Structures are given as structure tokens and as C-alpha cells.
Image: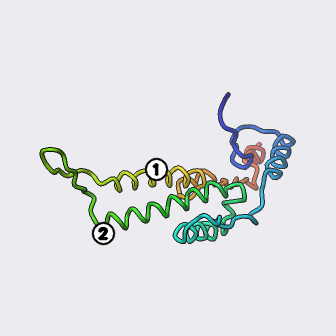
Amino acid sequence: MGRNRKIIDISTGKVGKQARSDRAEAEQKLKVGRDQLTAPEWLDDIARAEFDRVVREAGSINLLDNLDLGFLAIYANAWSGYSRMVQYIQEHSEIASRESAKDTYDVLSPYMRAEEKYIAQIMQCSSKLGLSTSDRLKLVVPVKHEDKINKYLKYLEKA
């Protein structure tokens, strides 16, 4: 199976000029438009606002495209659920009471568990979408600095 293929701009292995050109052309064909990045109707107001914010912010670096719509909608929906859980927990408590036949005791609120599930979903989707700085750094194309001076010329001048 092997390793995941890197885009040609960040490939560090030896690749011939023709192979590099062919791969760059193939990668260009994989680019998709951004014209369908609109929030789905089923998202609530909080999710829609987050969806629009991410599209606006990611647009400045051309990070997302139409194929990211599903992940972005799931992310925005999870963000909305997370926001509601945090608000509920702040208004009530992280601790809930549970009654048994003999006693009443404190347990972790089920809203805390729901919050944790939303956090996991947010983290998965944001990683797939490259929303965190560390995820975006994996996408950064290093600039290759080519020396204008041939490093072997100094040996020719001494001869």
C-alpha cells in the first residue's frame, strides 16, 4: 500500500522534470470550484453563522472547495450543539443528581458527555478541513530557494 502521496510542490524526493510537470498538471485537474459553499437549509442559526464564518475566513487562503461542503456542514452542526451544551452547563451545573432506592447522589451531567461527543466531532472535522493552524501547516508549500551562484565556480576560479 505504501505512504500517502504528497503534492508535487512539497515532494522532497528526486522527481524528473517531465514527471514533475505531469504530476503538477494532474493535480491542477483535481482542483474544484467554491461556488456551492453555502450553508444547507437544515442548519440552525448558530451553525449557519459558523458555516459562513469558516467559508469567509478560509476563502482568503483558498482552503475549502465544493467537496468540503459535507464536512463543513457536519462541523457547523457540531459547533452549534457544542455551543448549546456549554450554555446549558453554565446555566445549570456539570453535576446532576440521581436518585436510587436508598439515596440521592451526584453524577456527571449527561450534558457533559454530549459536550465531549460534540468536541470529538468538531476536532475530527476541523482536522479534515484544515481549520487549525497545525493542520494548515501540513498544507504549506515550502518555497524552494535556488542559489543563483553555482557553488562549484569557486573551485574553477582557483585552478
**Nearer to me, 112 or 156:** 112
Residue 117, position as x, y percentages in the image:
43, 50
Residue at the image point whose x is 72% and y is 53% from the top: 147
Tell me residue 61's x, y (percent). Answer: 66, 65
Going by the image, does 19 lie left or right of 104? right
111 in relation to 153, above or below: below
Please name the amino acid that badge 2 sits on: Glu
Q: Residues within 10 Å of mark 2 (few under 14, many from 20)?
A: few
Quarter of the image with the N terminus in it: top right
On the rendered structure, is 118 left or right of 5? left
Dot 1 alpha-carbon crowd within 10 angstroms: few under 14, some 14 to 19, many 20 or more: few
Quick one: SS at disc 2? helix
- Gap between marks 2 and 1 measured at Cα: 23 Å
Residue at 15%, 51% (x, y): give it.
104
Query: Could you say which is closer to the camera, residue 77 or residue 35?
Result: 77
Q: Which mark is residue 146?
A: none
21 versus 1 height, above or below: below
**Pick the front one: 3 or 83:** 83
Residue 120: which disc? 1
Q: Residue at x 30, y 69 (%)?
A: 91
- Farthest residue to the top: give it: 1
Q: Residue 91's mark?
A: 2
User: On screen, 98 above or below 159?
Assistant: below
Mark nearer the N terminus (2 vs 1): 2
Relative side of 114 to 69, left or right: left
Residue 98 place in picture, x, y as percent? 22, 51
In the displayed structure image, the side of residue 58 where residue 115 appears, left or right: left
**Measuring 71% from the left and 38% from the top, which residue is drawn there?**
13
In the structure shown, which secondary structural element does the residue marked by tag 1 occupy? helix
